[in-house]
Image (tube, grey):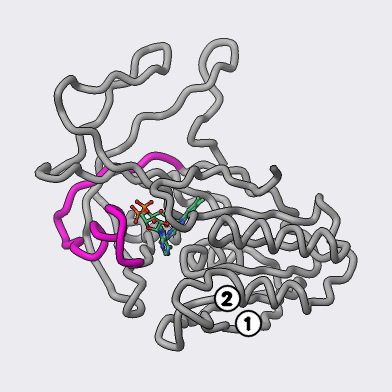
Amino acid sequence: MSDIQGRGGPGGGRRRPPPQTVEVVRVERVTPRLVSVHLGGGDLSRFRDAAPTAHIKLFLPAPGQDAPVLPTVTPEGGRVWPEGAARPTVRTYTPRAYDPATGTLEVQFVLHGEGPASAWAERAVPGATLALGGPGGRFGADLDAPRWWIAGDESALPAVATLLDALPWAASARVHLEVDGPDDEIPLSSRADLTVSWHHRRSPDAFGEELYDAAASATITGGTQAWVACEASAMRRIRRRLLDGGVPRESLVTRGYWRLGVADHPDHDHGED
Ligand SMILES: Cc1cc2nc3c(=O)[nH]c(=O)nc-3n(C[C@H](O)[C@H](O)[C@H](O)COP(=O)(O)OP(=O)(O)OC[C@H]3O[C@@H](n4cnc5c(N)ncnc54)[C@H](O)[C@@H]3O)c2cc1C
């Protein structure tokens, strides 16, 4: 899979492909707080081979604009923004699924109540214009691992689903998912032998506490690959607990997908600080 920062050009310098303008072709409410937006209108065929848990950058129109203002890319790979125009909101999401029959890409948004991307998704209608860059992101785990321990919150549901899609039939996966309540649960499937536990948040702001408890009480045997993505502070507590519990660093992938009280949390928070 390519990196959003992609390597290329003379001397192997970093070159970032320009974002591509696309439009909303279909919107579905999956749960009261999760909306699927199907994007089309561009050449999205590179998403056919997106790695599990890959990410994209979405460029959403600034207030008052119908389409995002985009930079031009110089031959050296630099970006030049048009003067005077408000820049788009840029946020990180997961390419959930590419449909080769329609050439469309599904992206699932958590409607978490505040934030421009959440608000955009809540209003999204067919014909709405945005742009996207990617896919990017290093997967970082061994897909041939025989056993998996997976934990995530709502923001990670799309990524967990791509991971479950990619696991081989010979694998087994123990999956812990933390959501607000029973209405937020979605069907998940895999060729692997799957055991899924849905945890309901004990209070509205107790992000990741159920996942921490699941980590604290887990027996994770050698050869198990652990993958965790959720709120950044919770991810760090879970990471520490798993390391203290004997999970080798090289068998652990942790990602902070958002941070409580922080807008536009960076997409490369691996909790390794
Ligand atoms: C690699 C990667 C893949 C991701 N994939 C997805 C995906 O497929 N679907 C998805 O919905 N999200 C995904 N996220 C998370 C998403 O990027 C963040 O939730 C992002 O902050 C949303 O932008 P926003 O404009 O709505 O909110 P922001 O402007 O970034 O934040 C505004 C406020 O909302 C809070 N907030 C942000 N996200 C949440 C949340 N999920 N729950 C509660 N409060 C929140 C922040 O703490 C902040 O106080 C992914 C993140 C990464 C790094």
Foreground disc of the pair 1, 2: 2
Q: Amino acid at mark 2?
A: Leu
Quadrant in which residue 143 is drawn: bottom right
Position of residue 161 measured from the top left corner of the image (x, y, whole percent): 53, 68
Q: Which residues are magenta?
A: 111-134
User: Vertical placement of 161 versus 180: above or below?
Assistant: above
Residue at figure coordinates x 78%, y 63% from the top left: 242
Ligand 1 positioned in quadrant: bottom left
Residue at figure coordinates x 75%, y 56% from the top left: 252
Q: Is residue 213 left or right of residue 102?
A: right
User: Vertical placement of 28 versus 104: above or below?
Assistant: below
Question: What numbered label is drawn on residue 196?
Answer: 1
- Magenta stretch encompasses residue 117: yes
Position of residue 12 measured from the top left corner of the image (x, y, whole percent): 59, 17
Say what secondary structure mark 1 lies in.
strand
- Magenta stretch encompasses residue 17: no
Quadrant in which residue 222 is drawn: bottom right
Quadrant in which residue 149 is drawn: bottom right
Note whether residue 92 is visible: yes
Q: Quadrant of the N terminus?
A: top right
Q: Are marks 1 and 2 in contact (CB under 8 Å)?
A: yes
Q: CA distance from mark 1 to mark 2?
A: 8 Å
Residue at figure coordinates x 20%, y 44% from the top left: 61
Q: Is residue 32 left or right of residue 66?
A: right
Q: Which residue is mark 2?
A: 177
Q: Check disc 1: other Cα within 10 Å, few if <14, some if 14-19, many if 20+.
A: some
Say what secondary structure mark 2 lies in.
strand
Q: Quadrant of the C terminus?
A: top right
Position of residue 237 measured from the top left corner of the image (x, y, whole percent): 68, 61
Position of residue 176 measured from the top left corner of the image (x, y, whole percent): 63, 76
